[in-house]
């Protein structure tokens, strides 16, 4: 609660998504800039996490939702609704939903949040 009141992390992290067909590029800016590219529907792929480690994931579409299943069983679902980007994380029996401000920049969607994938 204290972090919320103090707005800890607000405007400290951004992600910019460029989606062309099934090709996705996500650039994260949080202390340093990192980028990941992947193809939705192309099966299992490897990508670098913000901490520099490599993870294996399977990206798919569920309608207009981007679903990313990680090898540890965690699932991330991203969807744009109005002016918000909703991220739903599912890990075993725990579900967390994060709502971020969405801004469209040309063909890109940028989100501002306090800690992102």
Image (cartoon, rainbow, N blue to C red):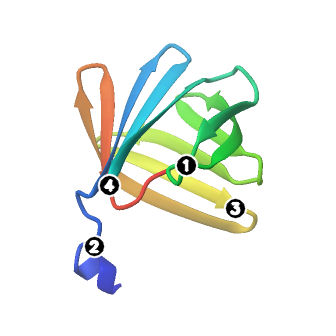
In front of the other: label 2 or label 4?
A: 4
Judged by depth in the image, the label closer to the viewer, 3 or 4, is 4
- Whether residue 30 is visible to the viewer of this picture, yes or no, is no
Q: Which mark is residue 8?
A: 2
Mark toward the viewer: 3 or 2: 2
Which numbered disc, 1 or 2, marks the residue closer to the eye?
A: 1
Q: Are marks 1 and 2 in contact (CB under 8 Å)?
A: no
Within 10 angstroms of label 4, few (less than 14), some, or many (20 or more) residues? Answer: few
Residue where numbered disc 4 is placed: 31
Q: Which residue is mark 1?
A: 52
Would residue 88 appear left or right of 72 to someone viewing this image? left
Q: Earlier in the sequence, mark 3 or mark 4?
A: 4
Q: Is residue 57 visible?
A: yes
Mark 3 highlights which residue? Answer: 91
Q: Tag 1, which secondary structure? A: loop
Which class describes the residues within 10 Å of circle 2: few (<14), some (14-19), or many (20+)?
few
Secondary-structure class at tag 3: strand
The disc, 1 or 2, on the residue closer to the chain's N-terminal end is: 2
């Amino acid at each position: 609660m204290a972090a919320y009141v103090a707005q800890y992390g607000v405007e400290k992290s951004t992600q910019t998504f460029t989606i062309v067909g099934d090709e996705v590029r996500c650039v994260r800016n949080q202390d340093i800039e990192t980028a990941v590219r992947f193809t939705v529907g192309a099966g299992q792929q490897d990508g670098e996490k913000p901490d520099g480690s490599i993870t294996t994931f399977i990206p798919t579409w569920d309608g207009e939702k981007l679903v990313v299943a990680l090898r540890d069983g965690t699932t991330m679902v991203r969807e744009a609704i109005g002016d918000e980007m909703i991220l739903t994380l599912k890990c075993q029996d725990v579900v967390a939903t994060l709502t971020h401000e969405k801004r469209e920049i040309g063909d890109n969607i940028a989100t501002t949040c306090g800690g992102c994938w």
